[in-house]
Image (cartoon, rainbow, N blue to C red):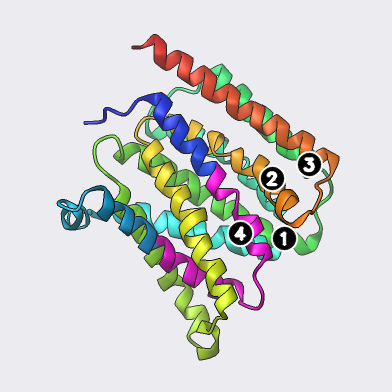
Amino acid sequence: MNDQTYSKGVLYVVLAGVFLSTGGLLVRFVDQASPWTILFYRSLIFTATVTLFVLARDRRSFKKQFLKIKAIDLLVSLLLAIGFICYLLSLFNTSVANTVLLLSTGPVVAGVLAYFVLSEPLRALTWAAMALAIAGVCVMVSGGVDASDVTGILFALCAVVAFAFFVVLLRYLGPQRDMMAPTALAGLFAAIMCLPMLLPLADNLAISGRDLLIAICLGSVQVGCGFIFITLGSKSVPAAQIPLLSLSETALSPLWVWWVVNEIPATNTLIGGAIVLIAVLMQGYTGLREANKNV
């Protein structure tokens, strides 16, 4: 039975966005490793991180949680693994701005899916927050798209769809059962999917100590903590709101780069990021207000 409050779920999802926002900064420090190599090691570390969380949370039922995994739970793992791969490949084939713009459509895709699959209502304020968030990202990444970006854009679209299905399925299954174990397996699935691109050349698995440290941080701090909190938040936050609230990632990403490596973002990036944060706060506030009315 799910006894988690909506407000706690909102806090989890917003925190997820904060952790996920560190990805752009960490990738900046990658030295020589290829995207597939980083993705392979990041995925293994992700599985290790979430598995350790499951173990630390409840040692007595640790083995039982993995033994209870059903076929539909593996679909959750597969969808998240596909999202991991497509997101990273998008970043390596187009600008971060283009990827972020497309990922900002996630709340719309997840909301429409949730409406048809879960019968979750889409209130007017949710639509308004979605529109405001997309407008904010458009301000951040205002500019044209070159023909050379097509591959990256296609990967980003695949990531959006995969993450949307992941969130809706997680929301469908999560309130009844603990979905942390299937989430942990997503990293293992992603690592296996990377092997065909790495095994033809044994050197592809070689990685420097510096790049391995980056991969460890990406797998544990960024996506590890990020998706632990998303999985926890899905127990009480509607599917349409999860990707919207986690758009704090979009607004915070340029700030990390600014503070750590002194890469000053453009004025439109700061303005657009502020708009996205307003949309996130608006959605969280309105959802919390409605949740309190039902208490």
Name the residue beneath numbered marker 2.
101
- Expressed as whole percent of the image width and height from the top left, the position of residue 31 reads 67, 75
Specify the label residue 94 is tagged with: 1
Secondary structure, mark 4, is helix
**Can residue 240 be seen in the rendering of this structure?**
no
In space, the residues marked 1 and 2 are separated at their CA atoms by: 11 Å
Q: Secondary structure at mark 3?
A: helix
Disc 3 and disc 2: Cα gap in Å? 12 Å
280 to the left or right of 188 = right
Find out whether residue 19 is within the magenta segment: yes
The mark nearer the N terminus, 1 or 2, is 1
Circle 3 Cα neighbour tier, 10 Å, few/some/many (<14 / 14–19 / ≥20): many
- State if disc 1 and disc 4 touch (CB < 8 Å): yes
Q: Is residue 72 left or right of residue 155?
A: left
Counting residues from the start of the chain, the first of labels 4 and 3 encountered is 4
Pick the front one: 58 or 239: 58
- Residue placed under numbered mark 3 in the picture: 269
* Mark 1, other Cα within 10 Å: few <14 / some 14–19 / many ≥20: many
Residue closest to the eye, 163 or 58 = 58
Q: Is residue 20 magenta?
A: yes
Residue 73: assigned label: none
Q: The magenta stretch spans which residues?
A: 18-46
**Picture residue at 55% right of the left edge, 84% below the top:** 204
**Marked residue nearer the N-terminal end (3 or 2):** 2
Secondary structure beneath label 1: loop
What's the distance in space between the residues labelled 4 and 2, CA to CA?
Answer: 13 Å
In the picture, the quarter occupied by the N terminus is top left
Q: Is residue 192 left or right of residue 260?
A: left
Which residue has dot 4 on it? 155
